[in-house]
Image (spheres, rainbow, N blue to C red):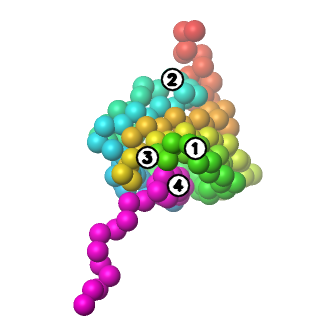
Amino acid sequence: MSTGTGPSPIPSPREVFLRLVHGVADGDLEELPGLYGEVTDVRHPMATPEAEPLTSRRALQEHFTVPPEARASLPKRLVVDVVVHETADPEVIVAEFAYEFTAADGPPAKVPCVFVMRVRDGRIIESRDYIDPIRTYTARGERDRLLAALRADPS
């Protein structure tokens, strides 16, 4: 008699994307590196200051590590306005969404994002994460940090 506890189906690119962005929003950062392949190519083309590509699960683990003392000060966020576009390549999706930040001392702020992701066998192996840096720093209450990064940029 079957107990229905066979192997879990491989999640679709859409499901992996949703786990990622909701995990970020919910602060479940320890689980996020497991969504990626051991070898990856994750880039943030709009990052300020410019960011190096994340090319391994270990690099992503470092990327998602937030010291416990800093977690309490992070603004709350929700994932809103999600639209996932499937492409001719079944591994690739284009996902439009926004993080809606709420801080105790300010109005809500919406940060638009577009992720172009390749998911193979349920793991992200490639992603281009386009996130508005000005609205992100503003939503986090870190405009001074953004200005310092722009002043330090030699270009």
Residue at figure coordinates x 43%, y 37% from the top left = 126
Query: How far apart are the alpha carbons under marks 3 and 4?
Result: 9 Å
Q: Nearer the viewer, mark 2 or mark 1?
A: 1
> Which mark is first along the chain, 1 or 2?
2
- What's the residue type where badge 3 is placed? Val
How far apart in space, not on screen, are marks 2 and 1 (Cα)?
28 Å
Q: Pointer 3 and pointer 4: residues touching (CB < 8 Å)?
A: no
Residue 20, horizontal then vertical, whole percent? 48, 53
Asked whether residue 103 is in view, the answer is no
* 22 in magenta: yes
Which of disc 4 and disc 1 is earlier in sequence?
A: 4
Q: CA distance from mark 2 to mark 4?
A: 28 Å
Residue 11 picture location, percent across and down: 43, 59
Q: Amino acid at mark 1?
A: Thr
Give the residues drawn in magenta, as a range: 1-25
- Residue 50, numbered circle: 2
- Secondary-structure class at tag 1: loop
Labels 2, 3: front one: 3
Q: Which residue is mark 1?
A: 87
The image quadrant that residue 93 belongs to is top right
